[in-house]
């Protein structure tokens, strides 16, 4: 979806895990990089095409069947087979993002930076902290981040990260919205 809408200067509300389908992500609620600014993906659904339990194709909207429309957008059940979604699109921002990874001994510094950055972060900034240990490696701590705006603004907001030092990986930079 994002590859098709990007050249038009538009984007849908995408998730942070590229292996999840648009339908699964959206109907499961849809928390992603744009959620702080634009809301949940499930709230951007305008209409849902389904095949109901009787085998009949239907188009469900808030006007045609408000209860089923609500249930399909995260009601946790098997209400129908979804065949298509109609979604709101949003202006595509410049996207600055990436992942910074440190060895586990830096966890306290990374956590303190996370708290400082997120204490008054604008809605355009999303930062997630994770502690992980892939098989065969030492524990690590990561910050995954996305800023919907210019790189210079993002770098100012995230300057605290640069004070930590010792990063194993730092992939921050401007990325295409379709890759976010």
Image (cartoon, rainbow, N blue to C red):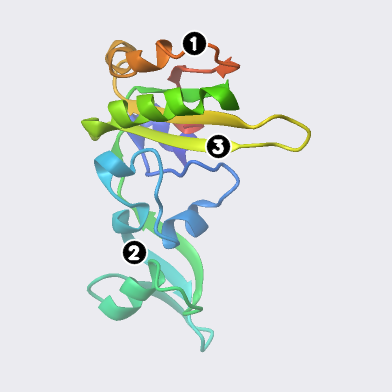
Cα gap from disc 1 to disc 2, whole angstroms: 48 Å
Residue drawn at the location 57% of the way across and 24% of the way down: 105
Relative to 161, is 20 on the left or the right?
Answer: right
Residue 65 visible: no
Mark number, residue 56? none
Mark number, residue 47? 2
Residue drawn at the location 43% of the way across and 43% of the way down: 14
Which residue is under mark 3? 131
Residue drawn at the location 44% of the way across and 14% of the way down: 164
- Where residue 118 sits in the image (x, y, percent)? 29, 32
The nearer-to-camera label among 1 and 2 is 1
Cα gap from disc 1 to disc 3, whole angstroms: 17 Å
Which image quarter: residue 2? top left
Q: Residue furthest bottom?
A: 54
Tag 1–tag 2 contact (CB < 8 Å): no
Relative to 94, is 166 on the left or the right?
Answer: right
- Which mark sits nearer the N-terminus, 3 or 2? 2
Tag 2, which secondary structure? Answer: strand
Which residue is under mark 1? 165
The nearer-to-camera label among 3 and 2 is 3
Residue 149 visible: yes
Against 159, residue 142 (above or below) is below
- Where residue 155 sits in the image (x, y, percent)? 34, 13
């Amino acid at each position: 979806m994002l590859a098709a809408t990007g050249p038009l200067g538009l984007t849908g509300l995408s998730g942070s895990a590229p292996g999840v389908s648009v339908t699964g992500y959206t109907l499961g609620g849809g928390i992603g990089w744009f959620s702080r600014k634009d809301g949940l993906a499930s709230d951007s659904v305008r209409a849902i095409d389904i095949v109901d339990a009787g085998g009949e194709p239907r188009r469900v909207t808030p006007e045609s069947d408000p209860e089923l429309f609500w249930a399909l957008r995260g009601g946790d059940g098997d209400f129908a087979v979804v065949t298509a979604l109609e979604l709101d699109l949003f202006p595509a921002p410049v996207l600055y993002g990436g992942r910074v990874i440190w060895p586990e001994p830096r966890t306290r510094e990374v956590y303190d930076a996370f708290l400082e950055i997120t204490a008054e972060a604008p809605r355009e900034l999303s930062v997630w902290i994770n502690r992980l240990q892939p098989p065969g490696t030492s524990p690590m701590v990561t910050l995954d981040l996305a800023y919907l705006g210019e790189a210079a603004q993002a770098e100012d907001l995230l300057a605290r990260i640069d004070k930590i030092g010792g990063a194993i990986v730092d992939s921050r930079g401007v990325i295409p919205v379709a890759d976010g």
